[in-house]
Amino acid sequence: MKTAFLFLMLLCTTTSFAQQENEGIKKCISTFFDGMKANDTMMIKTSLDSSCFLFSVVKTKDGRTVLEAETIADFFKQVAQLKGNKLDEQLLSYDIKTDGAMAIAWMPYKFYFNEQFSHCGVNVFTLIKRADDWKIMGITDTRRKQGCE
């Protein structure tokens, strides 16, 4: 009986810890997207690790799959240039996996520009826990206009 109770307590503690970690990860990701919506690069920057990379997996017009890299500086320029426009990336779900101070979040999304549907795809955020805060160390996404139901 004592062993079953200890096992149950350990299970509850582990589940609670995992939920707290997931909430911290979601908060970091929300800060990123809230910054995009507000065209606020300083807000976005608070969610990023200094090592952050940006990649997009895209299909070319001739059907090849390529990996496009973007610098954080170029991303910030784009966000700043779009000030006054509505950037609304709607996350449809989260699938978060953690291992110690590393996490990934798989998030299907739909993107709207000035309230008009633009594209959909999947974001994969790679995060690192620095001290008590989660930071985004990499974003890889896909983008498409079909199959977005």
Image: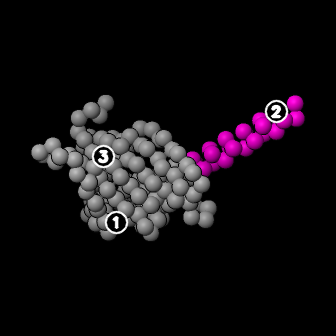
Residue underneath mark 2: 4
> Residue 94, how many percent across, how many down?
47, 41
Marks 2 and 3 close (CB-CB < 8 Å): no
Q: How crowded is mark 1: few (under 14 residues within 10 Å), some or many (20 or more)?
A: some
Q: Earlier in the sequence, mark 2 or mark 3?
A: 2
Read off the magenta span. Answer: 1-23
Residue 68 visible in the snapshot: yes
Left or right: 81 with respect to 128? left
Observer-nearest residue: 20 or 77? 20
In reply to whether residue 106 is colored magenta, the answer given is no
How many angstroms separate mark 2 from mark 3 (CA)? 46 Å
User: Residue at 61% across / 65% down in the picture?
Assistant: 131
Marks 3 and 1, how far apart at CA:
17 Å
Q: Confirm whether residue 114 shows in the render.
A: no
Image quarter for residue 115?
A: top left
Residue bearing the label numbered 3: 142
- Residue drawn 31% across the image and 30% down it: 149
Say whether residue 8 is left or right of residue 117: right
Left or right of 102: which side holds 56? Answer: left
Q: In which quarter of the image is residue 68?
A: bottom left
- Residue flagged by tag 2: what amino acid is it? Ala
Q: What element carries label 2?
A: helix
Q: Magenta: predominant secondary structure element?
A: helix
Name the residue beneath numbered marker 1: 72
Task: Report how far apart the C-alphas of labels 2 and 1 lie in the structure.
Answer: 50 Å
Question: How many C-alpha atoms fall within 10 Å of the one at disc 3: few (<14), some, or many (≥20)?
Answer: some
* Tag nearer the camera, 2 or 1: 2
Viewer-nearest residue: 58 or 78: 58
- Residue flagged by tag 3: what amino acid is it? Thr
Which of the two marks, 2 or 3, is nearer to us in this view? 2
